[in-house]
Image (cartoon, grey):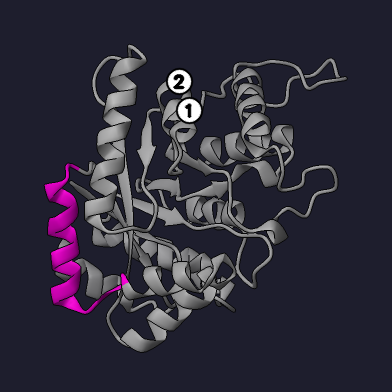
Amino acid sequence: MKIGIGLPNQVRDVRPEILPEWARRAERAGFSALGTVGRISYPSVMDTVALAAAAGATSTVGLISTVMIAPTWPATLLAKEVASIDAVSGGRLTLGLGLGLRADDFTVEGLGPTGLGKRFDQDIETYERLWDGGKVEGSENPAVPASTRRVPMLFGGMVQASFDRAARHGEGYLAASVSAERAGLMFENARKTWRAAGRSGEPRLVAIAYFVFADVDKGRASVHDYYSLGGARMADSIAAGVSGGADAVRATRAAFEDIGADELIFNPTTDDIDEIGRLADTVL
């Protein structure tokens, strides 16, 4: 199982200037990928910006969004942004996509938090058409250079439509911030849906888990704050699931390896850059 680390772009009032150095240190430490968590209506750094900064600061580590709230974006704009990040990184981006939970993140006029599934399916078709060189609607020009590839996509979500999208359009499935036991059930459904769709091989299965070493209470409070608009029950559950300290982190690593995760992204809960070394010493 590969081990990645998230960028702290989702931490409230993160210091944006540390993101390039965070990316460099993570690459030197040997993590497989750098991840992002994205929201719009929160005092954080946009996931596309964090990924672009990481792409420019590194040369070999993978990049992955876990997840990007796709329907908050106009499809053509997101397709171009994502293709651009992938291209400047030398083809290191995996695009993790989801529908989103919070109404306040839908800030673009005409793209509200309703009819998300249908719109998302249409958006995915737009991404693929544009990445294949299709023209922008109403223009004679394509959106991206001719060298653009289809960016690999993973899909998150707990409803069957999410697993169906992974099987139709993705290279795999990305589990939410849940226990390894629950993620294992999602992975099994992803495998089942993949086979039913006639896909060959196995889906790529990626999980995420929050961690903290230096200040466990602060880390859990940070996660609780981030998820609070989803309701107290959700925020309490995810905050309680933060792996606090070396023993808990090692146990989390083992649990996700046992359920067959191909990659586990440990997401930071603070922007303490020394957390990179602490995690590397524990799980790499």
Crowding around mark 1 (Cα neighbors within 10 Å: few <14, some 14 to 19, many 20+) is many
Discs 2, 1 touching: Cβ within 8 Å = yes
Residue type marked 2? Arg
Residue drawn at 69 percent across, 15 percent down: 134
Q: Is residue 240 visible?
A: yes
Q: Quadrant of residue 110?
A: top right
Residue found at the very far front of the displayed protein: 233
Q: Which residues are magenta?
A: 241-260
> Under tag 1, what secondary structure?
helix
Q: Main secondary structure of the magenta part?
A: helix
> In the depicted view, which residue is nearer to us: 103 or 90?
103
Query: What is the distance, in whole Å, between disc 2 and disc 1 at their CAs?
Result: 5 Å
Query: Residue 99: where, in percent of width, then height?
Result: 58, 44
Image-based side of 267 in relation to 260, left or right: right
Q: Is residue 89 visible?
A: no
Q: Quadrant of residue 189?
A: top left
Residue drawn at 48 percent across, 28 percent down: 165
Image-based side of 269 in relation to 225, left or right: left
Q: Quadrant of residue 40?
A: bottom right
Query: Residue 83: where, in percent of width, then height?
Result: 59, 34
Q: Which mark is residue 168?
A: 2
> In this figure, which residue is indicated by the disc labeled 1?
165
122 over 110 or under it: above or below: above
Residue drawn at 14 percent across, 67 percent down: 250
Q: Is residue 235 highlighted in magenta? A: no
Residue drawn at 61 percent across, 42 percent down: 70
Query: Residue 216: where, in percent of width, then height?
Result: 32, 85
Image-based side of 113 in relation to 253, left or right: right
Residue type marked 1? Arg
239 over 117 or under it: above or below: below
